[in-house]
Image (spheres, grey):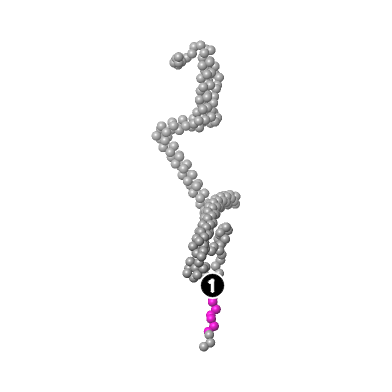
Amino acid sequence: MGRGKIVIERIDNSTSRQVTFSKRRNGLLKKAKELAILCDAELGLMIFSSTGKLYEFSSTSMKSVIERYSKAKEERHQLLNPASEVKFWQREAAILRQQLQDLQENHRKLMGEELNGLGIEDLQKLENQLEMSLRVVRKKKEQILTEEIQELNRKGNLIHQENIELYKKVKLIQQENMELYKKAYSTRDPSTANENGFLPYSFTLTRELHVPIQLQLSQTTPNLQTPARESEPR
């Protein structure tokens, strides 16, 4: 048989009340810990027993949870009042305008503008910031160029391998043509076959295929003027 429904009311027996308090307190603390971990929630739990003993749990610190609660409660109370709500949004707009002004001023300084009011120390900080930004930009550029060069080398190796395979196929076809020629004209005079154009086609590849082609940039040389031909005697 299943458990009967428990009536939610004060337990008169002190021993039973203490046992129930201990069990439900531990279960409540366990659920609070699971909620904080699973849902990334910030929470604080305080329990006072009938004897005045304190039991507490907080995901961060109880002081920060209480301060956050007080601030949120105050803001919610202010939002309920139309006049307070207007002041709240005016204060937020003023903060955003100040942040925008600071960003614009910092941008102008980075561009080398409005530097008259800066001292040696401020200029040194600005110079260090620019040098650090420049190093980051150069590092990123070098990374992109390196990746592009690696990709081009990979494609060049693939094309080189394809050229080698094509060369092998050409040599194979050449050998097959030579075999067919020997079978067809084995009894004929080679000099006569040559006059009638019966020799098979031949292929000559002068470039070494197993060495990748290296591309280099060279400076252009000025065109040399051809010396004038001496006039022939009449």
Q: Nearer the viewer, residue 138 or 74?
A: 138
Kind of element beneath mark 1: loop
Q: Nearer the viewer, residue 233 or 37?
A: 233
Kindly tell me whether residue 147 is visible in this rendering.
Answer: yes
Q: Nearer the viewer, residue 148 or 55?
A: 148
Residue 9 position (above or below residue 228): above
Residue 131 position (above or below residue 48): below
Tell me the chief SS of the magenta region: loop
| Farthest-out residue, bottom | 234
> Residue at point 56% right, 59% down?
209
Q: Which residue is mark 1?
A: 223
Q: How many marks?
A: 1
Q: Where does the image place residue 100, in percent across and percent down from the top left?
A: 47, 46
Q: Nearer the viewer, residue 211 or 139?
A: 211
Quadrant of the image containing the N terminus: top left
**Residue 194 part of the magenta-drawn span:** no
Q: Where does the image place residue 109, in percent across and percent down from the top left?
A: 53, 51
Start-end of magenta stretch: 222-231
**Residue 228 part of the magenta-drawn span:** yes
Kindly tell me whether residue 118 is visible in this rendering.
Answer: no
